[in-house]
Image (cartoon, grey):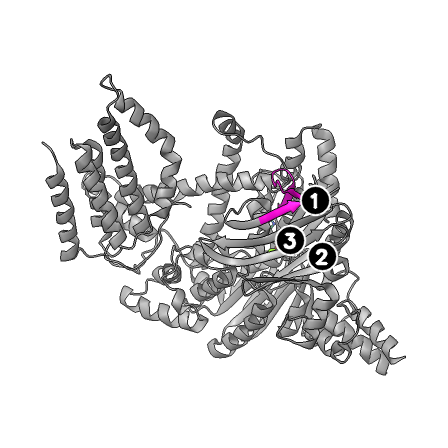
Amino acid sequence: MILFDRVSFRYKSNEETSFAIREVSFSCRQNLIHGFIGGNGSGKSTYARLIAGLLHPEAGKIEVCGLDTSAEDAQIHRKVGIIFQNPDNQIVGTTVEEDIAFGLENLAIPTNDMPEKIQQIAEEMGIENLLKKPVHHLSGGQKQLLCIASVLVMQPEWLIFDEPTSHLDPWSRRNFWKMLEILKQQRQVGIIVISQVSDDFENFDSIRLFADGDLVFTGSPEELKVANMADGLIHLPEKWQFEKLREAENA
Amino acid sequence: MPEDLHLEKLELFYQRQKVCGPINCRFSRGKINLVVGRAGSGKSTLLKAIAGFHNEVKGSISLDSQVFQADGNIALAFQNPENLFFNPTVGEEVCFALNQKGQSRDSNEEIGKKWLERWGLDAQKYWHKHPLELSGGEKRKVALSACTVLLPPVIMLDEPLAGLDYAGQLKLVEILEEIACDHIVLLVTHDPELLLPISSGILFLQNEEADYYEINQFIRNAVSSSDFYPLPKWYCQALRPFDGIREFPMINAASVHEFLQKKVE
Amino acid sequence: MLITFSPKESFLYSINPVIKGLITLFLIIAFSVIASGPVELGILLATVVIFSLLGRVDLLPIIFSLRKIFFLLFIVGLIQGFSQGEFDFLLALEAILRIVGVFFSAGIFVTISSQTELMYFWEQTFRPLALFGLPARELALVMVIAVRFLPVILSEIDRIRIAQMARGAKLSGGFGLSAVKSLLPLMIPTLSLAIVRAGDLALAMEARGYCVSRSRTRFRHYRVEFIDLLGLLLCLGIIFALMKF
Ligand SMILES: Nc1ncnc2c1ncn2[C@@H]1O[C@H](COP(=O)(O)OP(=O)(O)OP(=O)(O)O)[C@@H](O)[C@H]1O
Ligand SMILES: [Mg+2]
């Protein structure tokens, strides 16, 4: 469970005009795929960093799995795995297995237990034959799989993806959503996916729309489909629009 | 004004291993030219090779029948906008190419601000910010501005749609349509839907090969076989009964709906 | 092609990192100060090359980078060659072999040692300093960061050159002084950028539970095996055999 209780946040507290989150409250349940959507600069990535305990609220309180993110951020880092927009900025090791091991080292897992855990997660993500490879030899898609493996190996309770699909080719996008479904069911994790791609909306169990730091809509994809939204706030998937047109015609 | 960029028997290698080729293809001005393909098929390498940043190449590249000199004649917006940044403020970042060329700083600043606004960023608000302290989409817009202020003859964009919101994507389409009138524009993308109306053709890189398709041909193949290229499912389903037609409607709800209504009549 | 760690499986790669470092150190000393003629230096260099080929080391990047110091080699060769009045080809060759030898030894060390191994190497090497009350761990960290960031800064310069050309600006190209001059004003922003990027990396590390003050376990333990000592002895043996007193 993630809980936002009247949370306020600013990057630079002295600048009046800059981006701000003002007294926002909401909650996300575990075991669902939550979509965070909204235009550029609406604050999606900022919310992700707040949940992961990498930024702290100026006022209000954020709780993840019952822990206050400001007070216990070391604990939070274990509970929340985050995969950033750009894989290049988050790969720490020089080889695939070293990168996966990094999180385990931080958890102080005994050395002898590491190889098995690494092998297991690599098999789950289908990268077991890359373990010895240097990370700069990986393709973009492989890098993303590595980032997911490196985070999953720490057995987090929440997974956050910042725009995972925008750099994937259309073939890999389909695989990505299949993988998320499996993760959700087998690992019982809560998943948050930030996305700009409207075709992704259908894959969410629950959607939150942000605008200018504010939460302006919460609901299921079906509810978003019929919601009355201000013009230009959100572009609905062409598929939905097409269905609407057909329905109107048949009616 | 450039007319066409001609690739002849172009082969791309990466650490002595062949990535793609031979590519035989003519990119012309007027409309933009799309490049699509799976991850790792060599799309970015192709753009870098044309820009002269990747040297493991065989074959020839010519602009209007003359050997192509990349230096000073290309702009390339990288897949990762951060790779383009090296200045402390957005303003300097955007104006860099102009200042390098000379001319007065004031007029350069004016041009830079105009482009930022065109790409959808409030120039006043962002001018003095650090380029790396922006959101993902904002970084993309700054990188695009920095690559369009000077407009050399060949403009190349590597997945510019990634990270842009819908409003930003519409702006991109509008701006590129205009630029393509007197520049050669190459664009790598995973989301060709929005761009098809302003494109003249698609270069499809696959299994080390490169095939050039005219737009309707490409759509026809994708509609009749889902193994060819995954266009949106609803579109393919709606149009599968009509795969013999010469001109396909564009991939958006309104166009398809209109098309189907006409067919019924 | 940059000289970087490129992992493979071979006896060379699996040597204990500290022994790797020591062997490299001895080789560098042998190449640079020990009095020998060009023949012995040539044999030593050939031995190094043969062993690294047997150990599946990719020498291409090293040879490739050697081209960059070609000019330096040429000058040194000339100076040494003429040091006794008449041009002496053997003297010139000796000087060149010395530099190439040092270059190869260091290059191979970097190619076969991973980041973690380097970190471990420095930690162990500085450990005796702790006896004198010096902060060994911190010193090791400084070394690792220096080793890690030097290539970052060098590749940043490359990236920026490309980033400039990528906008259609024609560079006032050329080599030597003018090129250095045109890059100089960029050094400060480059450095600050490198720090911001390092900040991004730090954020990612923090997100994965990294914390300097907490104790962590290690993925790899390094023990000195008999075979490592054998390698060290073999190396010393070859050097002594080739030495001229
Ligand atoms: N490190 C930072 N320092 C200062 N301001 C920042 C920083 N990161 C982001 N901002 C600002 O905060 C606002 C929200 O940024 P955020 O990254 O959360 O947006 P986003 O919704 O993820 O957008 P996008 O879709 O473009 O990625 C933006 O206006 C941005 O300029
Ligand atoms: Mg973002």
Q: Label 2 crowding class (10 Å Cα cut-off): few <14, some 14-19, many 20+?
A: some
Q: Is residue A152 left or right of residue B203?
A: left
**A113 w.r.t. C90: above or below:** below
Q: Is residue B63 magenta?
A: yes
Q: Residue at (71%, 38%) from the top-left corner?
A: B112
Residue B64, which numbered label? 1
Badge 3 is on which residue? B137
Residue type at the position of mark 1: Asp
**A173 w.r.t. B53: above or below:** below
Q: Secondary structure at mark 2?
A: helix
Residue type at the position of mark 3: Gly
Q: Secondary structure at mark 1?
A: loop
The first of marks 2 and 3 along the sequence is: 3
Q: CA distance from mark 2 to mark 3?
A: 10 Å
**Mark 3 within 8 Å of ligand 1, using the beta carbon:** yes
Residue type at the position of mark 2: Gln
C77 or C104: nearer the eye? C77
Q: Is residue B135 magenta?
A: no
The single residue placed furthest to the right in the displayed view is: B265
> Magenta segment, which residues?
B60-76
Q: Residue at (72%, 72%) from the top-left corner?
A: B220
The answer to whether residue B93 is seen in the rendering is yes
Numbered disc 2: what chain? Answer: B
Q: Position of residue C75 (x, y in %)?
A: 34, 26
Please tell me if label 2 and label 1 are on a single chain: yes
The first of marks 2 and 1 along the sequence is: 1
Q: Position of residue C164 (x, y in %)?
A: 58, 38
Badge 2 is on which residue? B169
